[in-house]
Amino acid sequence: MQSENSKFKMEFNRRLIIFSLETIKLCNEVRKERNLWAIADQLIRSATSIGANVIEAKASSSKLDYLKFFQIALKSANETKYWLILVRESCPNLKDRSIKLLAEADEIAKIIGAGVLTMKGKR
């Protein structure tokens, strides 16, 4: 039987994958506007970087290395929120989807941020 911690990690990883996929779908729509291609590219990079760094942390060679991957994931989550705000404000037809992804990015950032604080011994 899996521990609660193990279940949480699996569910969180699943959320990160779904978040990345939903962001890619959103960006496919954003790319229909030529002047927003750069925003779509940056959004995909930052959103997919979150999950990639969390997964990559599993292969860390030390606790410090593990922490660094989570710090990068947190920075990527915060950057993703910025790009989602730009999409929300630039694409009225994608506002609802942007808002949902922005809320998920915020929750993801809070979870990762809490983990970083715990790893630093500040929580």
Image (cartoon, helix red, strand yellow):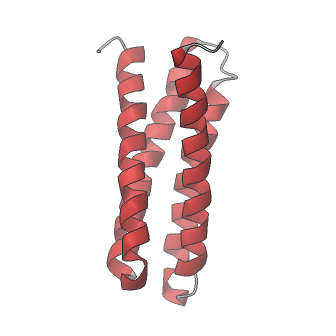
Query: In the image, is 3 to the left or to the right of 58?
Result: left
Question: Relative to 89, is 30 on the left or the right?
Answer: right
Q: Residue at x 59, y 36 (%)?
A: 13
Across and down, in percent, residue 65 comes to 58, 20
Count the marks: 0
- Compared with 98, 18 (above or below) is above
Near-viewer residue (16 or 42)? 16
Look at 55% across and 30% down and name the residue there: 69
Which quadrant is home to the N terminus? top right
Report x, y in % for residue 121: 34, 11
Name the foreground residue: 8 vs 116.
8
Residue 113 lies, in percent from the top left, at 37, 31
**Measuring 37% from the left and 43% from the top, which residue is drawn there?**
107
Q: In the current view of this chain or complex, which residue is farthest to the right?
A: 59
Q: Is residue 13 above or below residue 2?
A: below
**68 relative to 64, above or below:** below
In this rendered view, identify the residue nearer to me: 43 or 1: 1
> Can residue 48 be seen from the camera position used here?
no
Residue 38: x and y in percent read 53, 74
Q: Is residue 16 visible?
A: yes
| Residue visible at 40% across and 33% down in the picture | 111
Residue 37 is drawn in which quadrant? bottom right
Question: In the picture, which quadrant includes the C terminus?
Answer: top left
* 82 vs 51: above or below: below
